Amino acid sequence: MRATTIHAPGDIRFEEVPDPQLKKPTDAIVKVTAGCICGSDLWPYRGENPIRAGATIGHECIGVVEEVGSEVRDVRPGDFVVVPFCHCDNTCAHCRAGAQSACDQLGMTTSGQAEYARVGQADGSLVRVDGAVPGELDDELVASLLALSDVMPTGWHAAVAAGVEPGDTAVVVGDGAVGLCGVIAASVLGAERIVAMSRHQPRQELARAFGATHVVAARGKEGIDEVRELTDGIGADAVLECVGTNDAMTTAIGVTRPGGGVGFVGVPHGVDLPVRTLFERNIGLRGGIAPVRRYLPELLALVQERRIDPGRVFDLTLPLAEVAEGYRAMDERRAIKVLLQP
Amino acid sequence: MRATTIHAPGDIRFEEVPDPQLKKPTDAIVKVTAGCICGSDLWPYRGENPIRAGATIGHECIGVVEEVGSEVRDVRPGDFVVVPFCHCDNTCAHCRAGAQSACDQLGMTTSGQAEYARVGQADGSLVRVDGAVPGELDDELVASLLALSDVMPTGWHAAVAAGVEPGDTAVVVGDGAVGLCGVIAASVLGAERIVAMSRHQPRQELARAFGATHVVAARGKEGIDEVRELTDGIGADAVLECVGTNDAMTTAIGVTRPGGGVGFVGVPHGVDLPVRTLFERNIGLRGGIAPVRRYLPELLALVQERRIDPGRVFDLTLPLAEVAEGYRAMDERRAIKVLLQP
């Protein structure tokens, strides 16, 4: 098949690689109908994560089941499915407790920017989009379904981890695709005031379209002060930290009211947690890799009912063959998120 | 009045000091009928916290209202009251959000080991024990009411912050009075399995009496392994960290299942939070100074119905005049917690 591979920092190729094969009887092979580039794909692209030269890259996709292993019962060839980027059996003790991203059988999509992808634990992982035929869907719906493979559940996880409740004031730190999906999540979960911290006008606009009631462009101490002023000096009930840097975490904690919560989903890079501050202000902290499969049924219903449209985070669509340009566009922040069409 | 004072590390005196006075119209003066020594009083005693020579010490007490300021409406002289160690107006935005320990008017009892104590924000802070006459109560009830001024609500806060829910497996790290009250809290909140980590036999026994179903005496990696084995390798749903050291926090995080929660109430001393571990395992962390007033109505009812008996953490009762011996007994771990009778 033709797939996206990475050979070195900045060296993204679209080339012929062996087709993925069923390795276990619980696997499925999915023919990708849409894939995309994740912010986290930029780490190896920028040389910040190790690279195995020639490895396929990409973990977000939707598609049609092509082939299933002998033990797969719940999906069949021809089913149109959302592929959670982390695969899980959805039956182990961790999955039953809602921690599907810690599944005993945890796996990950490794060729989401390609023609085919192998999915482990197909019955536990895949979620069928019943009644939909891929070729007949409008672009908006395709994009929103694709967003369900990672970015929307990750933003949702930030909001759940932060403890957003109806009537809350929520703050979203980070205006990347995850942060923008975090705005959607805070809105659906009933936050009354949603402050998006963003300096970029197109992202500010999208945040407002997704439900942000306020935008704060300032950063650092100035940004914290501005949010505190907005909240009469009290701080926010729930704060979504969607970046992963120490600055973002400092801002997130700084704008949280005593007794409030911070949900963090950006993989921490150099974050130093101020335990005394957390203690003195009784600030809760929870986050991690999103248990995508846990949230999928609910989020899929919201997308199908057109109550949320996370697909709007895709502001550039390219043929899969032009994936390298997609990486460049995201790296240079010319695009929020890139959708790839095989 | 006669009060406990501290002059230097190890130098506890019982001596004459000026009577506390009403300073604000929202203050009350309480005649102390029972006070006690807190584990945190041992920090200055051991020279780990700064000392103002001759200052009164002690923040836990119950008693009878002696005098109230002109703006106090809800308590009157003669009322028998529980005095939360942290005073709050119970009306500000933080209090309304359940963060009474971050009240805009936050204060603290400073002469709980004395004949009289001043209480700020009397209407917000004090909780009347209706229908009870101090001199006519049995010792058990007095002790349990006294425990409501700090240690029981603090253990309760650990359990609430850890997110204990019915059916959970809970682990309590720390077998001091707070940890033991944490066992009570986990039990009342419905934990099915409660593991007390304790090396000391009398404390193990009390933990079992309070509802612990298992005791793990091992510490460090060995202790973590033992708890993980008890939980079929899964880990605990909710973990109460009731010490405040880095070792205790490491143990607490180590025994928490992915997606579980750690509630911490020991003031952190040298704790370095492992953000990547928290992230990778989606472990929630929340803790701080207990919002005592928030929990008091519920806990008082439990004590009055004799459904909980946190007063059993007091294993030594002394006349107030012998307070110095009380400090020695707790410092040398001869006593779990010392009750003082004026």
Image (cartoon, coloured by chain):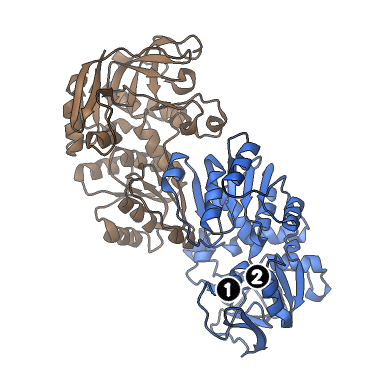
Chain colours: A brown, B blue
Which of B269/A308 is in front? B269
Q: Chain letter for mark 2, please.
A: B
User: To which residue does mark 1 refer?
Assistant: B46
Q: Quadrant of residue B180?
A: bottom right
Callout 1 amino acid: Arg
Residue B23 visible, this orientation:
yes
Figure check: A243 above or below A283: above
Q: Is residue A67 left or right of residue B246?
A: left
Residue A287 visible, this orientation:
no
Label 1 packing within 10 angstroms: few (<14), some (14-19), many (20+): some
The residue at the point 34 percent across, 24 percent down is: A110
Callout 2 amino acid: Asp
Q: Secondary structure at mark 1?
A: loop
Label 2 packing within 10 angstroms: few (<14), some (14-19), many (20+): some
Figure check: A144 above or below A256: above
Q: Is residue B193 left or right of residue A124?
A: right
Which of A202/A243 is in front? A243
Image quadrant in which the N terminus of chain B is located: bottom right
Q: Residue A12, how many percent across, how many down?
A: 20, 27
Which of A161/B260 is in front? B260
Q: CA distance from mark 1 to mark 2?
A: 8 Å
Figure check: B77 above or below B226: below
User: To which residue does mark 2 refer?
Assistant: B331
Asked if the residues shown at circle 1 and circle 2 are in contact, with their CB atoms under 8 angstroms apart, the answer is: yes
